[in-house]
Image: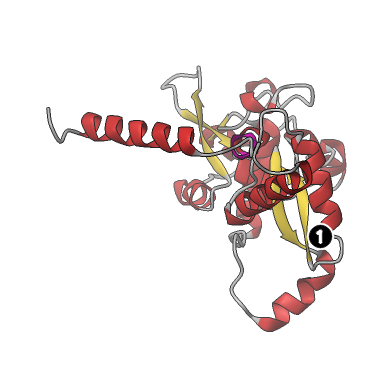
Amino acid sequence: MAGSPTAKQSRKERANAAAERLFDRELKDLPPELRWREWMLRIEAVIFASAEPVSRETLARVVGKECSIDLLIDDLIEELCSRPYELVSVAGGWQHRTRVRYAETIRASTAPTRGASAKLSEFEAMVLMAVGYFQPVTRSELSKIFGKEVSRDTIAALRGAGFIASGPRSPTPGAPYTYVTTKHFLSAFDMETLRDLPDIEALEDAGLLSRYAVQSEIKPAQPNGTDDDLME
């Protein structure tokens, strides 16, 4: 039917496809040196404009097919070495971050910052840490870990901040939803993958977390597992 959401989506897809055909990735009309420079600027522009780390696949859409993303990134990192911000690899992509030495300056300015992480209460932070280690995990299982109820409000706060998302339904009676961490979780805590989580034994020694709190009901995230299985 004319004007239907499906028809509108189809028109939008055709328009996007046409724009993509017109976009010159290869830049064959430019000399090699200017072509490389333009690719660098494109990569920097995409990363600068993005609110989240930008993946290799996304960056590959704006440069030539034979272009090395890694070499472009290396050149950008070198070019930014004298700037107060840098290009970092985080959460499976790249993102601009202010250098640590300027953190005090930014705080003193009281200027609003982009992508600031939500402030969590101590308990919310502990629940988030438990999700990180034991995902996919249900709210009931989280409550058993802490010996008290983990409320829906706590889960909603972590979801609202973008740190967790719904995972697969649990095979337990009632098939409740489980929760998993997101790429924003990795980005906010400067981690490339879940393998960068602190050593769980150190947290146990500090009395902050117990992997045996729910015994065999929860299977902790395995260091050798794939992150795609643990995050939405």
Placement of the C terminus among the 4 image quadrants: top right
Provide the secondary structure element on which disc 1 rests. Answer: loop
Q: Residue at x 24, y 29 (%)?
A: 6
Instruction: Please name the amino acid that badge 1 sits on.
Output: Leu
* Residue 170 position (above or below residue 196): above
Horizontal placement of 183 versus 191: left or right? Answer: left
Query: Residue 109, relative to residue 43: is it above or below?
Result: below
Q: Position of residue 148 (x, y in %)?
A: 58, 45
The residue depicted at 79 percent of the width and 51 percent of the height is 76
Q: Position of residue 132 (x, y in %)?
A: 67, 38
**Residue at point 72% right, 76% down?**
106
- Determine whether, in the image, residue 167 is placed left or right of residue 53: left
Residue 39 vs 122, above or below: the answer is above
Q: Please indicate, yes or no, whether residue 152 appears anywhere in the rendered image.
A: yes
- Residue 94, by quadrant, is top right
Residue for badge 1: 80
Q: Which residues are magenta?
A: 59-63
Residue furthest to the bottom: 109
Closer-to-camera residue (137/56): 56
Per the image, is 224 magenta?
A: no
**Which x, y percent locates residue 215?**
70, 25
Closer to the camera in the image, 108 or 1: 1
Report if residue 91 is visible in the image: no
Pick whichever, 231 or 157, lies toward us: 231
Based on the picture, tell me whether residue 62 belongs to the magenta stretch. yes
State the image coordinates of residue 131 (x, y, percent, origin top left): 63, 38
The answer to which quarter of the image holds residue 7 is: top left
Q: How is the image coloured?
A: secondary structure
